[in-house]
Image (spheres, rainbow, N blue to C red):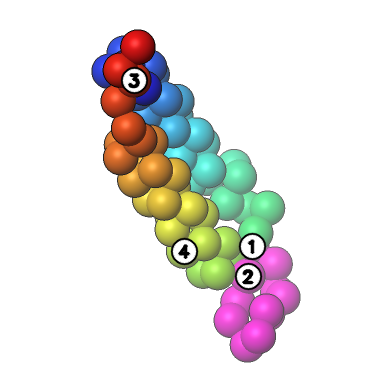
Amino acid sequence: MTERLRNQRLLALFAAGWALLNFPLLTLWDRPITVAGIPLLPLALFGGWALLIAVAAWVAEAPEDDG
């Protein structure tokens, strides 16, 4: 992956993370529901956060193109 493509993907991931962790979308998860005894809002927050970290690591550690 070229450096320019990696930067574009990380910038897009930043924008997606900002939207995911912003107020209007967070209200979708604010329900009186529990999953395995955990309230839905914290579960969605930490799950989304973990997903963003995993995708950022995957993009940042992708091998360089030699061609």
Q: Nearer the viewer, mark 1 or mark 2?
A: 2
Q: Which mark is residue 46?
A: 4
Tell me residue 59's x, y (percent).
Answer: 38, 36
User: Which is nearer the N-term, disc 1 or disc 2?
Assistant: 1
Q: Amino acid at mark 3?
A: Asp
**Eyeballing the image, is 17 above or below 53?**
above
Query: Front-most of 46 and 52?
Result: 52
State which region is magenta: 30-40
Q: Nearer the viewer, mark 2 or mark 4?
A: 4
Q: CA distance from mark 1 to mark 3?
A: 43 Å
Q: Is residue 40 visible?
A: yes
User: Farthest residue toward the bottom?
Assistant: 37
Tell me residue 60's x, y (percent).
Answer: 30, 36
Quarter-wise, where is residue 55 in the image?
top left
Q: Which mark is residue 65?
A: 3
Q: Which mark is residue 40?
A: 2
Q: CA distance from mark 2 to mark 4?
A: 10 Å
Q: Nearer the viewer, mark 1 or mark 3?
A: 3
**Eyeballing the image, is 53 above or below 42?**
above
Q: Amino acid at mark 1?
A: Asp
Query: Front-most of 31 and 65?
Result: 65
List the residue tagged with mark 1: 30
Quadrant in which the C terminus appears: top left
Tell me if mark 4 has few (under 14), some (14-19) or many (20+) residues whose alpha carbon lies within 10 angstroms of its own. Answer: few
Query: Front-most of 64 and 4?
Result: 64
Q: CA distance from mark 4 to mark 1?
A: 14 Å
Residue at x-position 63% and y-position 87%: 37
User: Which is nearer the N-term, disc 4 or disc 1?
Assistant: 1
